[in-house]
Image (cartoon, helix red, strand yellow):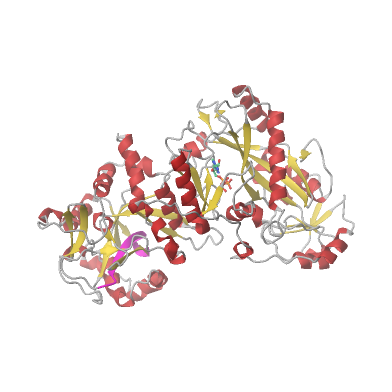
Amino acid sequence: MEMNGASDSEASFSYSFDDFLHGHKAQLEAASVPIQLWPALFEKLINLKFDAGNHFQIVKYEEGKGVFAIDDIDHLNEESVFLIDHAWTFSPSQARKFLENVPGLVERMAALFGSDNTPCGSEVSEESDEDEVIFENEKKERISECADVKEIDGSFPRQDSVDANLCRGANDDLQIDRLLKEIWRYAHTYTMRKKEIVDEEGMPVWYVMDEFGSLIGHSETPNCRVVPFFFTPHECAYSLLFLTKSLEKEAELCRDYVDTTVLKKNPSWRHILMYPWFGGEFDEPLERLKPTKDFFLSGRKMDDLPNEEEKTQCRKVARKTGGKLKVYSDSAQMLNNLDKVEVELVEDWHEADVIWMSKHFHDYRKLCTENPKALINQFPYESCLTVKDLLAANLQAENGDHEHPWFQTCFNLTTELPLFCNYFKEREMKGLENTWIVKPWNLARGLDMHVSNDLAQIIRLIEAGPKVACKYIANPVLFKRPDNQHMVKFDLRFIVFVESLRPVKAYVYKKFWTRFAINQFTLTRLDDPETHFTVFNYADKNKILQMQCEEFVKQIENTHKQLKWVEVEKKIYESIRGLLEAASKDDPPCGVAENPQSRAMYGVDVMLQWNNREKTDLGVSILECNFMPDCERACLYYEDFADTVFETLFLGNINSEKVITI
Ligand SMILES: Nc1ncnc2c1ncn2[C@@H]1O[C@H](COP(=O)(O)OP(=O)(O)OP(=O)(O)O)[C@@H](O)[C@H]1O
């Protein structure tokens, strides 16, 4: 028997198998779905034919539930591909909100997670309960429950997903906490990439499969694979189940829970990747070393540098200190905001006094030999400073640890997962605070970031893309928000102008920017973005507190009487200088390179924390350093900003009222 979500007439609309291949072939190949299954898959997708119930049943046994074959099933059979629906699609930062508000979601997830999936091979109970053959009925119910069936392009019916509607309802917080922990044994991920956004990586989507998919057991020698599949006409993802071995009647269906690219790249990590399901200890002593040159070079285009002689010649060239600057640029934002500094745009970079680029520049040698008088707003290999994983690697000591007081301990989970797990477990054993912030290094604006003290969750998060884990600042200095009276975390952005790196010659713009969290700081709800982040990607502007730095200083000194801002500022400036020195200490490609023609402006994000219980010892922590070719917000707040940038960086006009030498 099968479930058809579409009537015959709907199914016969003009979407052909060729259309299907055109839109999905790359996905099918990437997921290694055998080619002989594609026609049946196409047919099942357009008819929404969830027919797994004809071949499998859920069976309860002593340790839990599993999925078993009703008949012999040949894996070479062209029909042996089955659709699995997704019970819940979610983003981890919004999951709690949905559990609190969507009726029935807590109950469904609790029922789903309540079963204990044990590895294949467990004894099957003699009496396989009739009631447990649930897919078919359940699917019928699901479809009939779904009152809102939409027509897309007048042809395909599509059901609203469970996360589409929000409504109020009360649920037990403890149960939700438990579900949010358990979910990392059931959740899976795929990433949507939008073709039109070339530079930005896609945002990962997490989902829980329906009861059938979620109850498939684990084996290291699996007999099936389950892969996510985005079906464009439905604008919706399903999972596909296909067999890798034939099944005999009553055999248990088992997939490999860690059949992921992470495992493919690191086969020796299997026991670590299995931790979310089976736990374990990671106590092998591992030596942490600084990443090698190869690490810094992988996936990066090398910058071409002038040799020492060329640099020496270049240093002798006289440069402009006034008058009209000839500027070659790919970005007008900053130039449009210049008032006092006169500029003339040139089409040929050979003529330029200043090269102002938002795109990465690589040809420093050519610039040095063909236009030595020009200055440019970038340093070679500055990604060692501005990209999170490279910065963390750059700042590591030879023994691999981070020893700078202004930098939080940080692990690259793509290369150092075993080390991180050891470190995590060691802290756990010692009873030390163990909250981490897990950040992708290729997305900005706080996207795909997670605060967590749960090792299982952290391990699973790397399936959604490369990440670093940095020790979370658990004792931040808090700010009393005047609008809601909450004591919230905040971070500060300082703009630094770099004139040279060896030795460091740099200036900080005296005005800085403030960013505040919304909710009262607490370590109890680590999934709440409004408590733990100061950047928000939504439009509720009312919740965002804007405050000029002068007002911020007044208020923070008022709240924390032991703080004197002049002293805090001094520590911040010392830390920023420390950052620039440390980041350019190693030769390229492992550190930022000195270059006589380079000048740069970076945005340095800083948090303040208490180093002791008494709150007398203040620490400065640098979160990250951003390359800033444009500065819309700065130009909007401070009319003199663009002029100050150009005067400081390119005219050698250091105005001590606006910038401070660090
Ligand atoms: N180690 C940390 N401890 C506590 N909070 C942190 C830590 N690192 C980052 N955060 C917080 O996480 C958020 C994003 O941080 P970060 O600046 O590193 O990322 P981003 O995505 O590059 O954002 P942006 O580019 O907008 O600054 C901020 O709200 C920041 O306060």
**In the rendered structure, which segment of residues is drawn in magenta?**
231-245
Q: Is residue 331 left or right of residue 427?
A: right
Q: Determine if residue 348 is in view.
A: no
The answer to whether 570 is drawn above or below residue 280 in the figure is: above
Q: Residue at x 76, y 46 (%)?
A: 645
Q: Looking at the picture, tell me which residue is in the foreground, 127 or 444.
A: 127
Q: Quadrant of residue 565?
A: top right
Where, quadrant-wise, is the C terminus in this rendering?
A: top right
Q: Position of residue 197 (x, y in %)?
A: 53, 60
Seen from this angle, which residue lies furthest front?
285
The answer to whether 343 is drawn above or below residue 3 in the figure is: above
Where, quadrant-wise, is the N terminus in this rendering?
A: bottom left
Q: Looking at the picture, tell me which residue is in the foreground, 465 or 298.
A: 298
Q: Looking at the picture, tell me which residue is in the foreground, 147 or 238.
A: 238
Quadrant containing ligand 1 reads top right
Residue 114 highlighted magenta (yes or no): no
Q: Position of residue 184 (x, y in %)?
A: 36, 50
Q: Determine if residue 323 is in view.
A: yes
Q: Main secondary structure of the magenta part?
A: strand
Residue 235 highlighted magenta (yes or no): yes
Q: Position of residue 424 (x, y in %)?
A: 47, 46
Q: Position of residue 364 (x, y in %)?
A: 75, 64
Q: Residue at x 64, y 63 (%)?
A: 293
Q: Looking at the picture, tell me which residue is in the foreground, 559 or 647.
A: 559
